[in-house]
Amino acid sequence: MARDELAVLDGSKCILQLRGIRPFLSDKYALTKHPNYKYTADYDEKNALDIEKFLDRKMKLKKDEVFDVVAIL
């Protein structure tokens, strides 16, 4: 397909390219019908990854916690 043909492609279609076979025209998959859709942030905002919280890996010590300090040289 040429660029101008791709620009006017039906919105419910896509070009699917799999390794080993020529690209072909296919219907788009409705993501909301996928069994794991309920785990996405689109379904529920609480499923969104908070990258700042994820990357905050500081050790948090409890008041009377005992630990060993090891020096690595």
Image: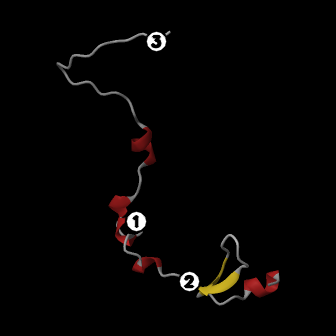
Q: Are marks 2 and 3 in contact (CB under 8 Å)?
A: no
Q: Report whether 67 appears left or right of 9.
A: left
Q: Is residue 36 above or below residue 2?
A: above
User: Label 3 crowding class (10 Å Cα cut-off): few <14, some 14-19, many 20+?
Assistant: few
Q: Which residue is mark 3?
A: 72
Which circle's residue, 1 or 3, is located before the other in the chain? 1
Q: Determine the CA span between mark 2 and mark 3.
A: 54 Å
Q: Secondary structure at mark 1?
A: loop
Quadrant including the N terminus: bottom right
Q: Which residue is mark 2?
A: 28
Residue 13 location (% of width, % of height): 62, 87
Which circle's residue, 2 or 3, is located before the other in the chain? 2
Who is closer to the viewer here, 25 or 7? 25
Q: Determine the CA span between mark 2 and mark 1.
A: 19 Å
Q: How many marks?
A: 3
Task: Give the quadrant of residue 70.
Answer: top left
Residue 31 location (% of width, % of height): 46, 77
Q: Secondary structure at mark 2?
A: loop
Who is closer to the viewer here, 31 or 52? 31
Q: Secondary structure at mark 3?
A: loop
What's the amino acid at mark 1? Thr
Residue 58 location (% of width, % of height): 38, 29
Mark linked to residue 40: 1
Q: Are marks 2 and 1 in contact (CB under 8 Å)?
A: no
Q: Is residue 19 above or below residue 25?
A: above
Who is closer to the viewer here, 72 or 50? 72
